[in-house]
């Protein structure tokens, strides 16, 4: 009889730890969304986003307007208009 109670307790602890770990994972994912990005880094479906140097909008790298180099930094633009405006302002 004591053996059965012991087994039940061990099982209960296992389930508790398992659900607790899942909860922690969920909380961490909501606090640090980059954890998910790191998990999906190997898949090609997630395209890198680049920030428009003029208006600050994020666009997929492939959709971004041709970059220009400024002091070694690559600059991307959401549209040709933004690129022209940025270059005019410099
Ligand atoms: Zn822009």
Image (cartoon, rainbow, N blue to C red):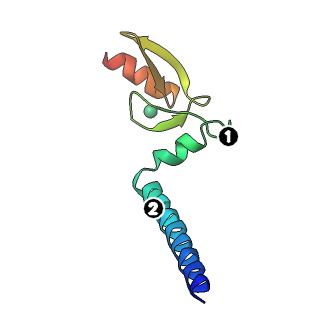
Residue drawn at 55 percent across, 24 percent down: 65
* Above or below, comparing residue 79 to residue 39 in the picture: above
Residue at the outermost top position: 71
Q: Secondary structure at mark 1?
A: loop
Q: Which residue is mark 1?
A: 45
The residue carrying pointer 1 sits among few (fewer than 14), some (14 to 19) or many (20 or more) residues within 10 Å by Cα, namely few
Residue 69: percent from left, percent from top: 44, 12
Q: Which residue is mark 2?
A: 24
* Above or below, comparing residue 50 to residue 30 in the picture: above
In the image, 73 versus 80, the foreground residue is: 73
Q: Please report whichever mark, 1 or 2, sits nearer to the chain's N-terminal start.
A: 2
In the image, 75 versus 45, the foreground residue is: 45
Residue 18: percent from left, percent from top: 54, 67
In which quadrant is the C terminus drawn?
top left
Left or right, 44 with respect to 35, comes to right
* The quarter of the displayed image where residue 10 is located: bottom right
Residue 15: percent from left, percent from top: 56, 73
* The quarter of the displayed image where residue 52 is located: top left
Q: Secondary structure at mark 2?
A: helix
Residue drawn at 44 percent across, 28 percent down: 82
């Amino acid at each position: 009889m004591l053996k059965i109670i012991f087994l039940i307790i061990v099982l209960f602890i296992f389930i508790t730890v398992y659900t607790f770990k899942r909860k922690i994972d969920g909380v961490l994912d909501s606090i640090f969304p980059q954890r998910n990005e790191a998990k999906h880094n190997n898949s090609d479906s997630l395209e890198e986003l680049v920030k428009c140097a003029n208006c600050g909008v994020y666009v997929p790298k492939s959709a971004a307007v041709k970059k220009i180099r400024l002091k070694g930094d690559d600059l991307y633009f959401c549209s040709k208009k933004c690129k022209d405006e940025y270059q005019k302002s410099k």
